[in-house]
Amino acid sequence: MSTEATTPKPKKRDRIGVILYLLYVAMLIAALVLIVRLAGIQLFWRPDPKIADALTPSNTINIIEPARGNILDSEGRLLAISCPIYQFYMDCTVLKDTNSPEQEQAWLGKARDLAEGLAAEFGDRTAEQYYKLITDGRANGRKYVRIGHPVDRNVYNRVIALPLFRDGRYRSGMIVEQEHIRQYPYGKLARRTIGFVRNNKSDVANTHIGLEGKFDYVLHGQEGREWMRVTDYGRVRNSDSAYVKAVDGKDLRITLNIDYQDIADKALREQIAEEPDLEGACLVLMEVSTGAIRAMVNLVREDGNGPFEEIQNLAIGRKGEPGSVFKTVTLMSVLNDGFIKSLEETLPATNGNVAGTSIKDAHIPDFARQHHTNRISILDGFKISSNYVFATLAVKNYGIDKSKGRGKGLEKTERFLQNIYNYKLGEAFAFDLDGLQTPTIPSPSTRYWTDTDLGSIGFGYSTEETPLHILTFYNAIANKGRMMKPYLVEDIEENGIVTERRGPGVLNAAVCSKAVADTITRALKAVTEEGTARRLKDAKCAVAGKTGTSFGTYANGQYQDAMGRRKYQGTFVGFFPADKPQYSIICTVYSKPTSRQFQGGGIPARAIRTVVDQLYNIDPCFREELKRSTVTK
Amino acid sequence: MKTWKLSDIGLFFKNSIQAILKGEFLLRLNIGRYFVHIAYTFLLFGLVIWFSLMIETTMSKVEKNKAVLKELEIVHSQKVFELVGVSRRGSVEDMLEQLGSNVKEADKPATVVKR
């Protein structure tokens, strides 16, 4: 046996196999290096934060703003809507460092054309001034130069089409900032009633005014939230992250009729515009059967001496001694309590002194002389607005029984005051606007009560009421004793569908009987026909109402200053048509200290006359119906 | 039944390393049996990536359309604002006066003709 046969032949190395094997080993080592490197990067390596920020795809949260709800008037017309405004800025340094001298000349040429366009559009600077603004900004390296003032969409479209700006932001340096603001298509009409919500950055504490403020929780809606990420296609919503849809605000349908508001606003402005001694005035129109407020005008001089603007809600926020319009309260009280049965009942008309008080009415001797009588009926007293008659009615029927001793015998007086509270003239009832003042009614059980207070209350002094309280009371008379709660918000709507109906409410189902309401209406008609409000006698429809004038007190408690000047509060309040009332209305004017007179029968009566005449022409309830006879041939 | 010893772990690693060095690791595991499943998994990976790209494209279209809608809403609200503004009673009166129109406020209530 040969050794060759038993010894294995040495294996011949396969060259390709070796190469592949080496490649395999190389890749294996590379893989091992990669695995180690990966583990190192994942576990130990911390990148430079700047580089990490630049390379990491941004995933940012985006707050989705809800669309604020609209405010609609009773006819569905838009009173408040959200629109964008645009503010232009300019980066004057754009392309400055990269432009060749020729390109720079061309840029400046376009800037000159732009300056002309901006001057024509904004009008706040000349073309030369705008050009200087741009070139100075370019020389000084200013990157955020404000151009003009905030503009609406139409002006925005025209401005972005101007030379240079039309080249786009990277060539022109144009910067536009957009902001949604609340716009009021009817301008200043009912601005205080509609109100506004101030920016939270405002340093004014009261940022929520009027209906916009009170119902901000309805109008605002709820913000949504989405995560955005940057892709090759731009910024898109990250579909893997949570998405909260924005809930748009609901609409508010209010009771104001903007046509009536326009008429009332114009009528009041006409009357007060040329009266420098007036500091403010208000006019409120209310629907008798529901208490819906159809117009609410509040005009106050801006900064004391400026033009009249809607900057304070006088109708609910200013209380004062109501004057003779309060005599109707005394009349209702004595009628309800059965102290008088008829308006023809009389009182002595001699010297005008109210028994047991220091109140004296100088008009009574004049009345007695003119009418050759020594008695005055309650109706006549109401017509001429006699303080004596109503102070006497109050003192005689509700006077303190002094025979019972100090602090006792107050029952009758308290009954009178309780009547006033029953007529809702002593409380701030729930209202759709914040700021309704609580009336002031004195109490005989306090040490501030004086002997003249009861008589004073009888003719409208010693108490403080807001115009809305007085109007609500007169509205109840027009509504045959049923006192409706004044309201401004009809319902809350979402895409035209009512989600919450608010509507009318009752404050007191019967402040008086129908007979008492009719009796008072007769007295109120007498005032406009023969009394202190004769200006309304020939109105297009019969008006029943009462005038009232009071004087504001000075710091020393007097009704006039050292120069004999008084602060007037003149009011007319009533309803129309007198026989079948549809609307109640009040107008009050407030004067500065003046030597002139501002009576309720003056400006307020004239303003109301205009409103009544114009409403009569357009209000559906005054339309006549003509029945067409169908004749068959 | 075979009982496992600590030295078996060392043997396992030794065999594995030898197999890796010889390029036989996957063959020894007999991974060929699961080839279809592995291919299917990679297909799913591909589909996921493809769908993600499609979603991204769609989302970018959504964003573009949202911007268009927003623009249209702005134009609409601006138009509504302008139209409502000129419908004010006082504005209409002024415009009629400027135009020299004879149309005036009604001076008596309308008469409704009924059958």
Image (cartoon, coloured by chain):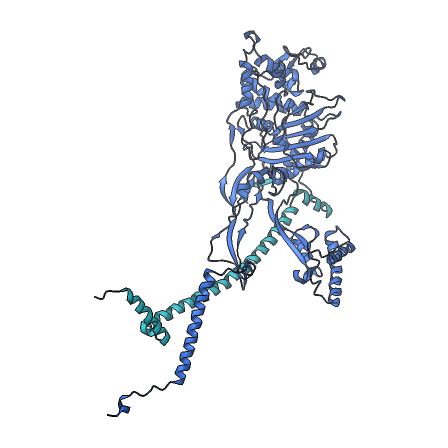
Asked if A287 appears above or below A199 in the picture, the reply is above
Picture coordinates of residue A313, whole percent (x, y): 63, 34
Picture coordinates of residue A464, whole percent (x, y): 62, 24
For the point 53% across and 14% down, the residue is: A411
Q: Is residue A551 visible?
A: yes
Name the residue furthest right.
A128
On the image, which quarter does residue A619 sit in? top right
Kindly indicate which chain is depicted in blue in the rendered structure: A
Name the residue furthest bottom.
A2
Picture coordinates of residue B113, whole percent (x, y): 58, 41
Q: Is residue A599 visible?
A: no
| Residue situated in front as seen by the camera: A351 or B49 | B49
For the point 43% across and 65% down, the residue is: B48
On the image, which quarter does residue A419 sit in? top right
Classify the position of the C terminus of chain A by image quarter: top right
Kindly indicate which chain is depicted in cyan in the rendered structure: B
Asked if A151 appears above or below B19 in the picture, the reply is above
| Residue situated in front as seen by the camera: B96 or A487 | A487
On the image, which quarter does residue A401 sit in? top right
Picture coordinates of residue A606, whole percent (x, y): 69, 30
Classify the position of the N terminus of chain A by image quarter: bottom left
Asked if A374 appears above or below B48 in the picture, the reply is above
Asked if A271 appears above or below A595 in the picture, the reply is below
Q: How many numbered circles does the render carry?
A: 0
| Residue situated in front as seen by the camera: B91 or A129 | A129
Left or right: where A223 falls relative to A593: left
